[in-house]
Amino acid sequence: MSGPAPRLRDRIGGGRAIALIDGNSFYCSCERVFDPKLASVPVIVLSNNDGNAIARTAEAKALGIRMGEPYFKIRDMCRAQGVRVFSSNYTLYGDMSARTNAVYRTFAPDVEIYSIDESFLDLSDVRERDRMALALDLRATVRAWTGIPTCVGIGPTKTLAKLANHVAKTIPELGGVCDLTDPVAYDHWLCHVHVGEVWGIGRASLAKLEAMGVDSVADLRDLDPRPVRKSLSVVGERIIHELRGLSCLPLELVPARRKGCAVTRSFASRVEDRATLEQSVAAHATRLGEKLRRDGLGTDHVTVFYHTSEYDRDRPQRSVSTTVRLPEHTNDSLTLIKAARLGVTKTWREPGSHPWRYNKAGVVTVDLVPLEMSPRALIGQLDRERSGPLMAAIDVCNARWGRGAVVPARAGLVERRAWSTKFEMRSPRYTTQVTELPVACAGKWRP
DNA sequence: TCTGGGGTCCTAGGACCC
DNA sequence: TCTGGGGTCCTAGGACCC
């Protein structure tokens, strides 16, 4: 062991300050903004297909609803307890996220959007004694302008800002803000927070650390980082440095180019026939094309997968994954659809007396490149001159009239009910669809 | 009946090269 | 019996995140 780790105050003297701000129970809070009746009742939001609870308000957590809990297991309880349940409404949440970030930028120009409900802000230029006031003002302004309640954690590194945010969320007396650039708070909270709360320490790492007798965050901070590398890799070593106030994770103000892209969905009900399966992957490929075009990226392959459910224990299992190569990079939906269908065609197996009941299918690509920078094929070149304007026209139509207004006939126009995702309890797209705007009349709010 | 979707990074190990 | 010493690149799988 090396000697005791240097204390924060010895290291950072007037250095960086990073804030992590996030929306409390973000998806639930978005629903609450547009329906005041939800204010103090338990609310949960479900994952795609109304499968699992992925956001819960404090009232819902108090009822014992766990993160990721399958909805069918708690449906009766929710009914009995008056829990308001929503399908996920990503259009709404994405728009609310953009609004909160717009507010953040009025407080700090350098913002890294980390996820749909979390952003890092650079507060290094804010004087130490002003940081707390600024954080409180930020929370109040976001609440007033968007309706979203938030918590703010401040620290000299991202890992410490995350930790501070966790403290701010779990200790109500702090008023939603915790500043770990304050040495007193730093010394106190690192000793009183469990190591499992540290950003980057998951189940596997936690088990290893517990076996080493590490219990608090301070225990982890005081480990010698070099030997830790053997069991927790460079990731663990980096975490220790970050906990000591030595920054290893820069603020990423410009989002990195995405490296892969996937569209995968569980079916609303099990699928046994080839036509339905093909139709679902064609729809996923259509969506894949939209996502690639939005980012100006192209792919030279499509990996198609489909499989049965591990929960169907008494049924025969089958899992298929195959990659279809393309002659050159593209983001043309028609080409992607053709490839995705081919992926099913060449792997399909006719069922016997005990058919496979598939529950999920998807399309995946990796190694994406900007389309204009990709080399052209010598043989089998695709017609970019026609495809580009055609796809652009489709995208414009879908932007104006809603996704799915124009779809390639090749994607199939048959019955969707068997496979398309369930959203039986979705709220209106209050902020992005004119027809779904909330209506207010004479002081009365009628969503 | 009903159990999500979409990412990133890291490591180990094999293939191949000089 | 003995049988180099590096390199690079690729892939699969693990771990973690929201």
Image (spheres, coloured by chain):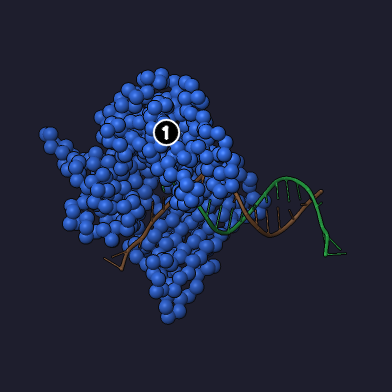
Chain colours: A blue, B brown, C green
Residue A127 point in image, percent of width and height? 41, 19
Residue identified by numbered label 1: A161
Above or below, A239 relative to A45: above
Comparing A267 with B13, the one in front is B13
Q: Nearer the viewer, residue A200 or A35?
A: A200
Amino acid type of the residue tagged 1 in the rendering: Ala
Please, what secondary structure does the residue beneath circle 1 have?
A: helix
Which residue is drawn at the image coordinates 26% and 44% (left, top)?
A58
**Residue A141 image position (x, y, % from top left):** 29, 27
Give the camera-side residue of A53 and A411.
A53
Instruction: Tell me where residue A308 appears, x and y as whole percent.
Output: 43, 67
The residue shown at (17%, 43%) is A37
On screen, residue A245 above or below A435: above
Number of disc labels: 1
Residue A389 is left or right of residue A148, and the answer is right
For the C terminus of chain A, give its image quadrant.
top left
